[in-house]
Image: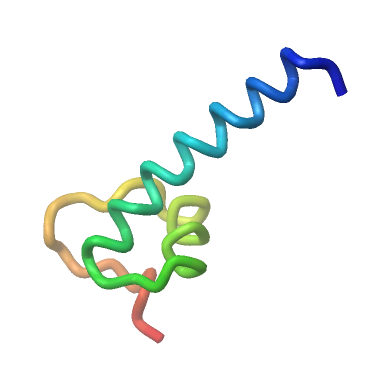
Amino acid sequence: MSKSWGWWLLAGFAVWTFFALQWADIGCDYPEAYMAVVRFGTPEGLEFIPACAG
């Protein structure tokens, strides 16, 4: 893998982590938070979204 691909992957992971931390702030565990980004995108306000409802 070239260096430019590595930087793109690192940047993508950093953005994914940024959004996952928003889910973690509203009560998700970290693995659930990363999957919530994939399934639901970013959390919107304080409305209930079943991303972390065990």
State the residue lying farthest toward the bottom.
Answer: 54
Q: Position of residue 26 (x, y in %)?
A: 22, 65
> Which quadrant holds residue 27?
bottom left
Q: Is residue 2 left or right of residue 31?
A: right
Q: Considering only vertical position in the picture, is 16 above or below 43?
A: above
Q: Considering only vertical position in the picture, is 4 above or below 29?
A: above
Residue at position x 72%, y 13% in the image: 4
Q: Is residue 43 left or right of residue 1?
A: left
Residue at position x 46%, y 69% in the image: 32
> Which quadrant holds residue 51?
bottom left
State the residue lying farthest toward the top.
Answer: 4
Residue at position x 27%, y 52% in the image: 43
Q: Position of residue 28 (x, y in %)?
A: 34, 71
Residue at position x 15%, y 63% in the image: 47
Q: Position of residue 14 (x, y in %)?
A: 48, 36
Q: Is residue 42 left or right of residue 11?
A: left
Q: Quadrant of the C terminus?
A: bottom left
State the residue lying farthest toward the left.
Answer: 46
Counting every numbered tag in the picture gives 0
Which coloring applies here?
A: rainbow
Q: Quadrant of the N terminus?
A: top right
> Which quadrant holds residue 8?
top right
State the residue lying farthest toward the right.
Answer: 1
